[in-house]
Amino acid sequence: DAMVIQNPRYQVTQFGKPVTLSCSQTLNHNVMYWYQQKSSQAPKLLFHYYDKDFNNEADTPDNFQSRRPNTSFCFLDIRSPGLGDAAMYLCATSRVLNTQYFGPGTRLTVL
Amino acid sequence: DAKTTQPPSMDCAEGRAANLPCNHSTISGNEYVYWYRQIHSQGPQYIIHGLKNNETNEMASLIITEDRKSSTLILPHATLRDTAVYYCIVTFPNTGNQFYFGTGTSLTVIP
């Protein structure tokens, strides 16, 4: 089945140690999104790619970066994770002007 | 910023209709109303969306008031598996459908 895949599902990193989260899709959607969801809170949009065009939200910290090497893959890089970055990270995809489909998320723990 | 207001929690008896309200009094003419739900520790799941007219699919019905300032999601026969957080999102279709989640409604279906 076509879907949005996130790897790994659980990631543990150390304070300050860079970490990369991965998202892939078989839907051939041209828009990909990254959200951060902290415990008991709603998802918060970090940024999105429309094809190769990167769109950052104004309040997304510089510590968060993203790469999209091709249509199928998108990566979230956290350059120096702090304890406050522990969260579920959700990837979603959509066609332009259309419904978003979410992956299962990666739960990040920062020690 | 989120443009929606939802009650924080609701209960519904199993087998009865669940009616989840959402206020979006600042909605503009081109903005859509989307509903998603999130079962604990999973990615949000698309339910339904609409612009002006009422919509129905295999999961739910969406009733949008004539002035479009509020809407109601109806789950016609709630089951225990419908226990989740339900998010109402207003979005303007642009290069991406940026979603700014509100706090959502935690629905508990009671046996």
Image (cartoon, coloured by chain):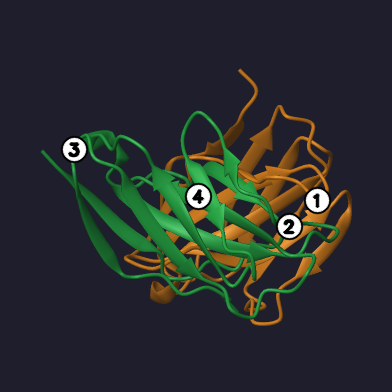
Question: Which chain identifier belongs to the orange chain?
Answer: A
Is disc 2 placed on a helix, strand or loop? loop
The dot on residue A97 is 1
Q: Earlier in the sequence, mark 3 or mark 4?
A: 3
User: What's the residue type where badge 3 is placed?
Assistant: Glu
Is disc 1 placed on a helix, strand or loop? loop
Q: Position of residue B98 (x, y in %)?
A: 70, 62
Q: A24 above or below A97?
A: above
Q: List the residue tagged with mark 2.
A: B97
Hey, which residue is sitting farthest top in the picture? A1
Is disc 3 placed on a helix, strand or loop? loop
Instruction: Provide the chain ID for the residue under circle 1.
Output: A
Instruction: Provide the chain ID for the residue under circle 4.
Output: B
Question: Which chain identifier belongs to the green chain?
Answer: B
* Residue drawn at the location 67% of the way across and 36% of the way down: A24
Q: Quadrant of the N terminus of chain B?
A: bottom right
Q: List the residue tagged with mark 4.
A: B36
Q: List the residue tagged with mark 3.
A: B14
